[in-house]
Image (cartoon, rainbow, N blue to C red):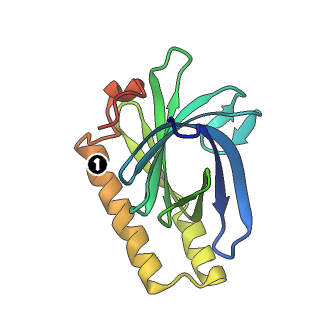
Amino acid sequence: MSAPRGITVCVLKHDGAEYRRWSASLARHEADLIVLDAEFDVDVSHEILGEIKQQTRTVEYYWLNRWYNVFRFLEGDGSTRLWYCNINTPPEFNDRVLTYIDLDIDILVDSDFSFQLLDMDEFETNGRRYGYSDEEKRQAQKAVDELITMIETRQFPFLLETASLSVVG
């Protein structure tokens, strides 16, 4: 019996308000790792990434026990365009819905593994607005540090060889 492939990703703000939602296909679920295959269903204008065209494909890596996720944006030929990392609460995965709370901080990683830490000001502002706990602030910093180490040492999923969904770790 195969697992259901249609997954809904629901991103919340700290107050529980829905921030974003999209559909994806379950590519792999092993222990605490969930890998989704998704495609933008509309054109999106992003202040850092520029125009993200409809049908842009992403491979999304979620760990149920980690305070971040990683999106690998693909070129038309399946090669890696970039990685986009989100700092968030560990996701919950129930009844084909994956939900997490966005904690604002992002890391943009180019295909040459150079990276930029983004939205620290938004993290500070929303930390005051929503009352992020000291534990959430500690976990967010720990997640940033862990991701930077993973990027710098080319740990999964920061490998150009991960173009195939069958390569998960």
Vertical placement of 51 versus 152: above or below?
above
Left or right of 130? Residue 133 is left
Badge 1, how many Cα within 10 Å: few under 14, some, many 20+?
Answer: some
Towards the viewer: 157 or 34: 34
Residue 31 in percent (x, y) is at 35, 51
Query: Residue drawn at (47%, 64%), measured in percent from left and top?
Result: 90
Residue 62 in percent (x, y) is at 46, 50
Where is residue 54, by image quadrant? top right
Left or right of 71? Residue 162 is left
Towards the viewer: 124 or 17: 17
Q: Residue furthest right?
A: 42
Query: Residue drawn at (29%, 38%), measured in percent from left and top?
Result: 169
| Residue identifier under label 1 | 150
Towards the viewer: 69 or 131: 69
Query: Residue drawn at (32%, 53%), measured in percent from left and top?
Result: 148
Task: Give SS at disc 1.
Answer: helix
Residue 26 in percent (x, y) is at 54, 38
Vertical placement of 58 versus 107: above or below?
above
Left or right of 132? Residue 17 is right
Residue 43 in percent (x, y) is at 76, 33
Q: Report how many numbered discs are placed on residues in the image.
A: 1
Vertical placement of 122 versus 1: above or below?
below
